[in-house]
């Protein structure tokens, strides 16, 4: 099994944090993990990419040209990953979720937590089964923050 995820968004949206959490969770279940951050100029509002591979065997090369899942979290990122769109098996674009996020009062700064829950569900649906481990890493990272209960709700909303 080899599962490839490309997460794209604007700098500051938590793209790298999401990939890091998933990497830690996969590693804790003895999967082989490759995570390549691509920072670009996100410090100045540019797009940020994270190439993530999870496998039950060693990962031969850290980058890829055809993801199994492509998550797009901004308009600028959509342009940056346009070459991957026809190649990806499953595309999850924030524009398709904005109404749902608004209806459920998800704070814009917590969209990444919602999408982390969505990615956890996708990994479970693909028999990789990391939702408990992802939640555990997320709780370790955010559990002592004042808005933990709110973020917990957003994660669970995404993982439905």
Image (spheres, rainbow, N blue to C red):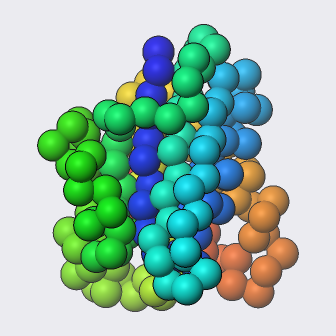
Residue 78: x, y in percent?
A: 28, 66
At x 70%, y 59%, the residue is: 138
Q: Does residue 118 sit above or below 146 in this rendering?
A: above
Q: Quadrant of the C terminus?
A: bottom left
Q: Does residue 61 sit above or below 21 in this rendering?
A: above
At x 78%, y 69%, the residue is: 143
Residue 76: x, y in percent?
A: 33, 75
Q: Residue furthest front?
A: 41
Total of numbered circles in the picture? 0
At x 60%, y 52%, the residue is: 37
Indicate left or right for 13 with 137 as reference. left
Q: Is residue 159 visible?
A: no
**Which one is nearer the viewer's eye here, 74 or 40?**
40
Q: Residue furthest top?
A: 57
Q: Which image quadrant for residue 88?
A: top left
Residue 66: x, y in percent?
A: 32, 34
Indicate left or right for 119 with 131 as reference. left
**Which one is nearer the viewer's eye here, 137 or 15?**
15
**Which one is nearer the viewer's eye here, 37 or 137?**
37
Residue 126: x, y in percent?
A: 39, 29
At x 33%, y 63%, the residue is: 80
Indicate left or right for 30 with 123 as reference. right
Q: Does residue 98 sit above or below 120 in this rendering?
A: below
Q: Is residue 80 visible?
A: yes
């Amino acid at each position: 099994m080899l599962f490839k995820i490309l997460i794209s968004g604007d700098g500051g949206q938590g793209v790298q944090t999401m990939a890091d959490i998933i990497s830690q969770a996969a590693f804790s279940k003895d999967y082989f993990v490759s995570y390549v951050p691509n920072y670009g100029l996100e410090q100045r509002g540019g797009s940020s990419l994270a190439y993530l591979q999870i496998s039950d065997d060693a990962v031969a090369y850290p980058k890829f040209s055809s993801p199994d899942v492509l998550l797009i979290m901004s308009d600028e990122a959509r342009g940056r990953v346009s070459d991957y769109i026809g190649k990806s098996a499953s595309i999850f674009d924030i524009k398709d979720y904005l109404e749902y996020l608004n209806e459920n009062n998800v704070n814009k700064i917590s969209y990444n937590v919602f999408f982390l829950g969505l990615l956890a569900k996708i990994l479970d649906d693909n028999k990789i089964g990391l939702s408990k481990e992802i939640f555990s890493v997320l709780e370790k990272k955010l559990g002592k923050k004042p808005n933990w209960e709110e973020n917990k709700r957003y994660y669970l909303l995404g993982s439905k």
